[in-house]
Structure formats: structure tokens, C-alpha cells
Amino acid sequence: MKQSRRSFIKAGGLLASGAALGSIALKSLAKGSSFDNLFHDSATLKEFGLQLYTLRADLPKDPKAVLKQVSEFGYKQLEGFEGGKGMFWGMTNKEFDSYVSSLGMKMISSHCDINKDFDRKAAEAAEIGMKYLICPYVGPQKTADDYKKIADKFNEKGDICKKNGIRFGYHNHNYSFNKLGDVYPQDIFMQNTNPDTVDYEMDIYWVVAAGQDPIEWLNKYPNRWRLCHIKDRQKGADPKNFDASVDLGTGSIDFAKIVKTASSKGMKYYIVEQEKYEGTTPLKSAEADAAYLKTFKY
């Protein structure tokens, strides 16, 4: 059967289009995407972490048993804090790393007291491949100059981290998003710290609790927010109620919209944190939060 020139060209065009689409698909997959993401405008978090402060009441009882449960929930990354037994819960840094690695997890960061033994902490963190040491809190200050002095301290700690091959970060609360005169303290931090050594961990809950829009701040300072705390806020919570943390997916924060922006602005690590457990337990909430993120799309 003879094929007309028009039919031949049409068929050839379809083949070319198919080949091009196949090439795009392969390139996308090579970058870690999926066919679902290619043909549908959505993505998933392939890995997410847990801030161990969520389990601060349980960890001291039996750190290894609690960490094993955390791994079973589906967490692949951990963010530590300095509890009564230190960042590594009575273990050396290498012992801790070996144990969590055997569970399929990695400690990528830790909150710590940056005013005590910071050089040692930076060296120990770097030794096991951690990425960050983070200042969790500085408290509200009286003047803009007070915040600038803290920014200078952040730069000093950033330099120490850089010498060790890791990075320094600051985790916000609501106070840095409340204006001091005509300026936001968070702007002072961002504008007076070295982007080559100092990053920021956006606690989405605290930005929202301060009445601010996380997306606006992500857009304002792209590639400065490298970690975030995913923590939901109770629906209809009084604006003055700062103790309104709830299980992910049951609150008022639109994480899909925020994470979509964050992923395009340099965000690398998504870390669950919960501070209140209404009618449940810390471990049950950590399990529920992991279950939510396993099916989360943005």
C-alpha cells in the first residue's frame, strides 16, 4: 500500500514528538523526577526529617529504642538538639552516627548552645558528615543595634563552621518577624550576615504565628532559607496563642503552596517539629506527621 507524502510527514512528526518527549522524560528521571511529576503538576518530598525536640520527653528514657521507632515511621533525616545527654544522647558522635545509619537515617543538623564549646561541636559535627549547626533562639532584643551584634556573632560562628566544612544556621521564632520601629529584626539578620557562611532555617509555624506570609519571605531572600520546620498551627487559633501546634494536615497552614515556592528558592531540608500533643503522645504525633508527609504533594 502506498503512503501519501502528507501521511508520511504527519507520521514522522508524531514520531519526532514522541522521541523528544521521551528524551525529556529520561532527562527528568535522571534528575530524580518521576513520570507522575512529569505529566502532573505535582511533586513529593522524597526525604524528610524530624527535629528530635519533638520527642524531648521520650528520648532520655531510652534513646536507641526511640530512634528505632522514628526510623520505622519513615524518617530518613534527623535534626538534633542539646538535651541532658548532649547532642548525641550519651553516645560519641561516631557511635551515634553508626547507630542511626544502621537504621537508615542520617543526622543532618543540630540545634545547640552556640556560646559553649562551639569549636568542638563544629569539629564533631563535621566528623560524621553533618551539614549544619544551628542557633535555635536568641530572644527578642531592645534595639536594632542589639540584633546587629547578634548578626556579627552569627558571622563568627559561620566562619568556624566553614573551617570545618559545614555551615551555620539560625532558626527563627515569631519575635524576628515583629517590627522593631520601622524594621523587621529578620531583615537585620539577613542583611548583616555573610551568605557564604550563614543560612537560615525557616520555622514556618512561627512566621505564620507572627502574622507574616512565609512565601513573601522565601521570595525576598532566595537561597538563604536552606532548612525549614514543618509544623502546623491549629485552625482558628487566637493570634495571641503561640502554643497551638497540631498534627500535620489538621491545622490551617497551606504547606503545599509554601513548599512549592520553597523548593524553587533553594530549600534543601524539610524537618518536622511538633511542640504540643492534643489528646495524643509525642511518638504518636511523630508517626502521624510522617504518615502525612509520605502522601504529601505540592
Image (cartoon, rainbow, N blue to C red):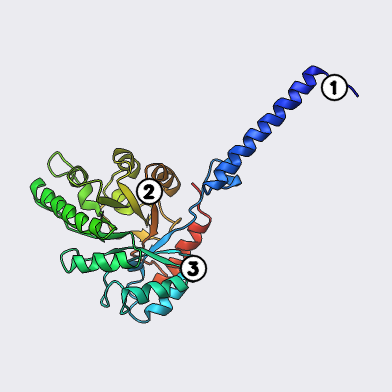
- Which residue is at the far bottom? 61
In this view of the protein, which residue sits in the foreground, 286 or 81?
81
- Tell me the residue that label 1 is attached to: 3
Q: CA distance from mark 1 to mark 3?
A: 60 Å
In this image, 231 relative to 293: left or right?
Answer: left
Mark 3 residue type: Phe
Find residue 185 and report its horizontal and vertical position in percent.
18, 46
Using a 10 Å C-alpha cutoff, classify the residue at mark 1 as few (fewer than 14 neighbours), some (14 to 19) or many (20 or more).
Answer: few
The relative height of residue 287 versus residue 257 in the rendered view (above or below) is below
Of 256 and 88, which appears nearest the observer?
88
Residue at (51%, 51%) from the top-left corner?
44
Q: Is residue 284 left or right of residue 35?
A: left
Q: Identify the residue under disc 2.
A: 267
Q: Amino acid at mark 2?
A: Met
Q: Residues within 10 Å of mark 3 (few under 14, many from 20)?
A: some
Precedes in sequence: disc 1 or disc 2: 1
Rendered image quadrant of residue 132: bottom left
Q: Residue at x 40, y 78 (%)?
A: 64
When the figure is inspected, residue 118 is found, relative to residue 210, above or below; the finding is below
Regarding residue 281, the answer to whether it shows in the image is no
Q: Nearer the viewer, mark 3 or mark 2?
A: 2
Marks 3/2: CA distance? 23 Å
